[in-house]
Image (cartoon, rainbow, N blue to C red):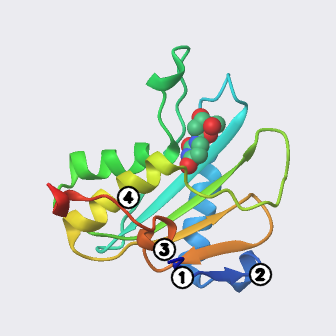
Amino acid sequence: MEKEIKINFETIASYNDLSEVEKTLFNKAKEVRKNGYAPYSNFLVGCALLLENGEIITGSNQENAAYPSGLCAERTAIFWTSANYPNAKIKKLFVIGGPKDDLSSTPIPPCGGCRQSILEYEAKQKEEIEIYFTAPTGEIIKTKSIRDLLPFSFDGSFL
Ligand code: THU
């Protein structure tokens, strides 16, 4: 029997339609994106996390000549957060990506590996993380939880 999975997401037309805190996250992600080390892909990604105490943690992608040794912006930010603030809850995650010299407007979604990592920390903190993804300009896509981006997810409940 064929079945369907429904996921929910919201589209936000542009930067001007974001709330003040969302605008701050957008600006921080856009700023830190410039620190991305991406000599191999020339694709820069920035990520900003909002913690429940209002602090914002950022990260950018860090590549390596041995390609799999590099790390995405989202995981750079999340792992740093958990390493330094192991009890902090992440409320929102904002990611902005795109080619280095291009003001593209296609929203860049988190890769599969990052979705899996975000899921781990959502489970750890027992509270959903709102995900926003976008390009340096244009539409922003928002989900209430990483589960909307990762149907049939594998988590620690199976172990
Ligand atoms: N990248 C991220 O930082 N986050 C993602 O979710 C997608 C991909 C980075 C990894 C690599 O440095 C570059 O983008 C091209 O794949």
Element under disc 4: helix
Which numbered disc, 3 or 4, marks the residue closer to the eye? 3
State if disc 4 and disc 3 touch (CB < 8 Å).
no
Q: Residue 156: which quarter of the image?
A: bottom left
Looking at the image, the residue that sits furthest to the front is 1
Q: Nearer the viewer, residue 17 or 122?
A: 122
Question: Between disc 3 and disc 1, whose residue precedes?
Answer: 1
Q: Where is residue 84 in the image (x, y as percent from the top left)?
A: 22, 48
Looking at the image, the residue that sits furthest to the top is 65
Q: Is residue 139 placed above or below 20 in the rendered structure?
A: above
Q: Mark 2 points at which residue?
A: 13
Question: Between disc 1 and disc 4, whose residue precedes?
Answer: 1
Q: The C terminus is located in which quarter?
A: bottom left
Mark 3–mark 2 distance (CA, rounded to whole Å) = 20 Å
Q: Name the residue under label 1.
A: 6
Q: Which of 112 and 82 is in front in this view?
A: 112
Q: Mark 3 points at which residue?
A: 148
Tell me if the residue at label 2 has its CB under 8 Å from ligand 1. Answer: no
User: Viewed as shown, does residue 31 lie left or right of 77?
Assistant: right
Question: Between disc 3 and disc 4, whose residue precedes?
Answer: 4
Q: Is residue 129 placed above or below 76 in the rendered structure?
A: below
State if disc 2 and disc 4 touch (CB < 8 Å).
no
